[in-house]
Image: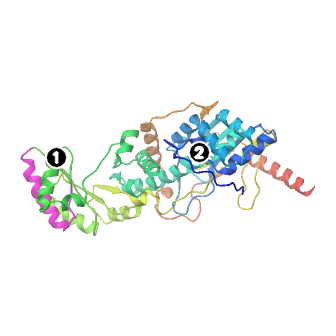
Amino acid sequence: MTDSPSPPLRGRHPGPVPPALVTDLYELTMAAAYQAAGIEHEATFELFVRSLPRERRFLVAAGLDDALNGLEEWCFADDDIAYLAELGTFPPAFLERLAELRFTGEVWAVPEGEIVFAGEPLVRVTAPLVEAQLVETWLLNRISSQTMLASKAARVALACGDRTFIDFSARRDHGVDAAMAIARTSWIVGSGGTSLVAAGRRFGIPVSGTMAHSFVMSYDDERDAFRDYARTFPGNVILLIDTYDTIEGARHAAEVAHEVAAEGITVGAVRLDSGDLAALSVEVRRILDDAGLPDVRILASGDLDEHRIAALLEAGAPIDAFGVGTKMGTSADAPTLGAVYKLVEDAEGPKMKLATGKVTWPGRKQVWRCDGHDVLSLHDEEVPGGRPLLVQVMSNGHRTFVEPIARIRERAMAELAALPEQLRSLEPADEPLWPVEISPGLRDCAERIRADLEAESRR
């Protein structure tokens, strides 16, 4: 570990964090050492997840759009260089080099929305060694966090089946960046929208909301709160009915629905946010139906996740849609992925790590989706009957692949709909349930390199 003196206090950096500074210090110290040694050859790194959390049977690739945008913008501004100089760590010649550095590499990646598994490269970077090394933290941060969130949201989508779910998580997410990411990734895998207005604007996602308990509590009579809200938003009336007594709230909602119907206003739904949602939804449905309001839907929220949703639907709860927040937005049961970024090839040829428990497959690789299994191969091997997952997305530091979010959503939802039964289960898995086979060429390459390394170590 390299220690550096604490820099002088500086003013806050205006605007967004520059992608080039989203790097661990050791990336910069390694890059400085490479430059000092005159090492400038091309290298290939691959980003993959070592193993799936027990709570995940598959992953959904996500985060690529953010990652590529950052690589295109990647540079060290004058004030970034000034800050690094203040650390007192780096040689002036290295800082001068950074001032001119841009990402000029080639990137291959799995498009967002594809189903992926452990050990499969999600991103492959080929670039001058310094560039390829310095973008490691940025790529891991963008890809692993959003893949984690998309994979959690996909489980919610599977649990909901033909019912709608909405992202309600922003207030509990781990920062604004995470809130934007879960709004986008949940939309990709099939949500009906988000409560987060900023995400609606940036990504074109439908925004959805109801009212808070404080709104109802601001009135002496719950019915007056319902009336005012309905008359203010006549095109989208959803009434929160559990502030005091849910059953009485349902009766009040039915009463107000009939009153405002005379004004041409339709109450579209009521929302339950607490209590025994299964039992309450049955009783609320009965009250609404008895009042001649069979088209008023029931929306449920309140610490929901895929398991609670599945249990509610299995119990026959007549809930039409779900607002899902904290547990989805934080991927509460599996909040991290073991994503890594490893050197697999350089000017001398394929590279292989032999550390115990962390052995890597050498060389630039491709992933093939076959009938009932995947195949991991060298990049120039062909796998008959397979569909290659990695596509070129950047050349010479510029994007060559841009997809609208609607296309990504279409892909993800089709992939989820086609999942085999063993992957659709929400239960933990003690072992991988989708085979990822190693091609003959890749296996031969690994055996040859291992033999060479072992022979070298005996000299």
Q: Which mark is residue 356?
A: none
Give the residue displayed 40% in from the left and 64% down from the top: 307
Report the predominant secondary structure element of the magenta stretch. Answer: helix
Q: Position of residue 232 (x, y in %)?
A: 16, 46
Instruction: Please identify the residue farthest to the front as the structure is shown.
Output: 8
Q: Which mark is residue 370?
A: 2
Give the residue displayed 9% in from the left and 48% down from the top: 261
The part of the chain drawn in magenta is 239-263
Give the residue displayed 27% in from the left and 69% down from the top: 275
**Residue at the disc numbered 1:** 232
The answer to whether residue 447 is left or right of residue 74 is right
Q: Secondary structure at mark 1?
A: helix
Q: Position of residue 200 (x, y in %)?
A: 36, 42
Q: Position of residue 70 (x, y in %)?
A: 56, 39
Kindly tell me whether residue 379 is visible in this rendering.
no
Q: Of residues 41 and 12, which is closer to you in this image?
A: 12
